[in-house]
Image (tube, rainbow, N blue to C red):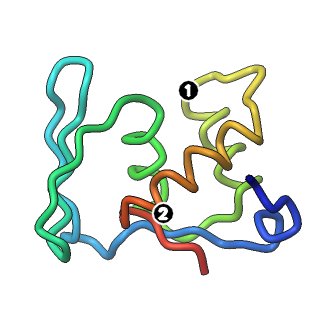
Amino acid sequence: MIDNAAVQLAIFRAPEEGGLLIAPLDEFTAVYHRASGITHLLTEPAPQILAILGEGTLSLDALLGRLGDDYDLEDADRDALAARLDELIDAGLVERL
């Protein structure tokens, strides 16, 4: 369950530069997390989220805005993005600050 109050105040970040090795594989993207030694297979929009957060920390709304601008999303779903972020946090690929 998404805690909207916590999500509104949270800032998210990806691992430091060099912390992830990313390789596109057709419909999937392989992401090797150096710190854990685990390789994850991701589908859209997770690789795009990691790419944007790799540039710096962002709030949920700022990330939603960047995704909307970069990928011409007209009806981006805030709750869906929060759910994807929770999945990336559970996988250890994104940190909530």
Residue in view at x 18 percent, y 48 percent: 22
| Residue placed under numbered mark 1 in the picture | 71
Residue 62 relative to residue 17: left or right? right
Above or below, comparing residue 78 to residue 72 in the picture? below
| Residue placed under numbered mark 2 in the picture | 89
The single residue placed furthest to the front in the displayed view is: 1
Kind of residue sitting beneath label 2: Ile
Q: Position of residue 67 (x, y in %)?
A: 60, 38
Residue in view at x 56 percent, y 53 percent: 85
Q: Quadrant of residue 80?
A: top right
Q: Could you give the CA–CA distance between mark 2 and mark 1, rounded to whole angstroms?
A: 22 Å
Q: Position of residue 28 (x, y in %)?
A: 24, 27
The crowd level at tag 1 (other Cα within 10 Å; few <14, some 14-19, many 20+) is few
Residue 75 relative to residue 94: left or right? right
The single residue placed furthest to the right in the displayed view is: 5
Q: Position of residue 50 (x, y in %)?
A: 41, 52
Residue 50 relative to residue 23: left or right? right
Q: Position of residue 74 (x, y in %)?
A: 75, 20
Residue in view at x 20 percent, y 63 percent: 33
